[in-house]
Image (cartoon, coloured by chain):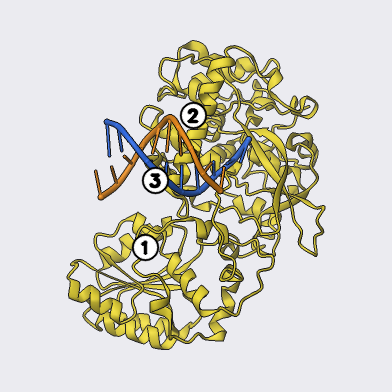
Chain colours: A yellow, B orange, C blue
Amino acid sequence: METSFYSPRHELFPAGLRVLVVDDDPTWLKILEKMLRKCSYEVTTCGLAREALKLLRERKDGYDIVISDVNMPDMDGFKLLEHVGLEMDLPVIMMSVDGETSRVMKGVQHGACDYLLKPIRMKELRNIWQHVLRKKMHDGRDTDSLEVIDGLQLQMAGSRSDHHFFSGEDIWAGKKRKEAEAKHDDKWFTDLGSTTKKARVAWSVDLHQKFVQAVNQIGFEKVGPKRILDLMNIPWLTRENVASHLQKYRLYLSRLQKDDLKTDFGGMMKHPDTASPDPPLMTGEDISRGNLGFSGNGLSMSANSKGHETHVKGILQGPRVEPKGLFTGENPDKQESMDMKIAIRQSSMPSSGPEEGRIVFDCSVPDHSPQSVNSKLQPAEGGAKFIETTEQPLYADSRCSTHVTVNPMKPQSSNTVGGPGMDNNMSHCQDFQPIPPYPPSMQSQSFGSISMPQYDSQVGWLQQDLQISELQGHIDPCIVAEGPIHVYDALRFDYEQFVDPYECPIFDHGLFIA
DNA sequence: CTACGAATAT
DNA sequence: AATATTCGTA
């Protein structure tokens, strides 16, 4: 019903960037389109330069950036570049197969903000938004409102461009901006100009999930920041970001296997009261191990749900195959959850009042319905994904069970949730949501600790398995429920209404069975 | 030169 | 504590 609560464009910055690709070669057009889509950009392709110009003129405010080939039959790429620069002042990236200096030079001289050589790779497209941003920044200096806007400055600032050709000013200097066009995407850039802080990637549950999923997909033996990054396919994320997270993740794992040799989950939760109900099911490690086929140990899946374990084990063991040891040969049987803290930040925004706690929400149901959930959740303003909340532990809320009434009848549809049987490459991860930067005024305040969910895939297959094997009846809802915690979190709030039962089967099965 | 990852900084 | 950055190594 409220499908379009907000325009994705505003909430997750680089995502939704409107790119116009111009190339007379249909093959390249396709390839580029695909790659750009993967970057979560909104792509429009065009085989004719003239037509491109026409499109641009018709919808002056319809595109954020243009990528054009240099050699085109109907109109010289440089010509197009010129027109664009003159008429709409959009950033233009030129490309060609050869890297002949003179051509590149020409492109640059004509105002190209970048010059890519074919074959073009993802890494080269991931950060093209930087050009849009840069332009905005230099153009609209007037936007001094370093106010709120939890917008994307963070992520943006955070990502590193492996290839900027220019420091920025040069190119844009002297160009006059048009107020008119400045408005549509101003939401993105507002106050970016003044406040470009360093980006700090907040590893939200969602992000972590993708991370774990990637790790599991690759196998611990072979994981490396680079590969993870590629799998995660999140444009603004850098290898360093992943490396850093990986380091932390490994630390967690090693620590776990070390001291926590056989303890079951019981003590894990910091908030017993609330925690116990929704046990951290399988945490990444668990899964990894379990899945990984470590010696039979995998069995001791998170025992959280009393008595359910058995089922879980069985299920888990079933489908899961790819054994890749987390830590080769080390104690495989330990499982714990990686504790993740969700920061509850205070916003000192005038309107909201300092005492409001906010949780970085950014949850997204893996496959579909991310919008259903997200849309509701995300405040329209600023695109920040914060949810107001008190400081209680995330687990504390069990409303879900009550509110979210999903109809248990249709487990079938559920499999989609975890991205289980899904394609191996997480191509669908495009629904990523950059976490909003902490507004200047926000600070990390208190934390609720939750265990990291990593079951994405597990859940996925788990559910699938269930369906397939018709085990549903046997399986306790709890088990099934062992889904991504973030999902629950999401549910905690009152968006039940937005959740489509069929789409989010997980919700059913009384996740929060107390 | 790239990618890792431990150490170290913020 | 969580991330970023640095830096020696492969």
Residue A86 in the image: state x and y as whole percent.
Answer: 39, 88
The residues bearing labels 1 and 3 have C-alpha atoms spaced at a distance of: 18 Å
Q: Residue at x 58, y 19 (%)?
A: A301
Badge 3 marks a residue whose secondary structure is helix
Q: Residues at marks 1 and 2, common chain?
A: yes
Answer left or right for A262 relative to A489: left
User: Is residue A225 shown above or below A383?
Assistant: above
Dot 1 lies on which element?
helix
Q: Nearer the viewer, mark 1 or mark 3?
A: 3
Q: Residues within 10 Å of mark 3 (few under 14, many from 20)?
A: some
Mark 2 falls within which chain?
A
Give the residue type that dot 2 points to. Arg
- State which mark lies toward you, 3 or 2: 2
Q: Amino acid at mark 1?
A: Glu
- The local secondary structure at tag 2 comes to helix
Q: Indicate left or right for A48 with A386 as reference.
A: left
Residue A230 numbered mark, or none: 3
| Front in this rendered view, residue A87 or A296 | A87
User: Eyeballing the image, is A418 above or below A436?
Assistant: above
In the figure, residue A501 lies in which quadrant?
top right
Q: Nearer the viewer, mark 1 or mark 2?
A: 2
The location of residue A30, given as percent across then percent down, is 32, 62
Which residue is label 2 attached to? A250
Picture residue at 66% right of the left edge, 59% below the top: A439
- Residue A366, visible in the rendered structure: no
User: Which numbered circle lies on residue A472?
Assistant: none
Q: Which mark is residue A33?
A: 1
Label 3: chain letter: A
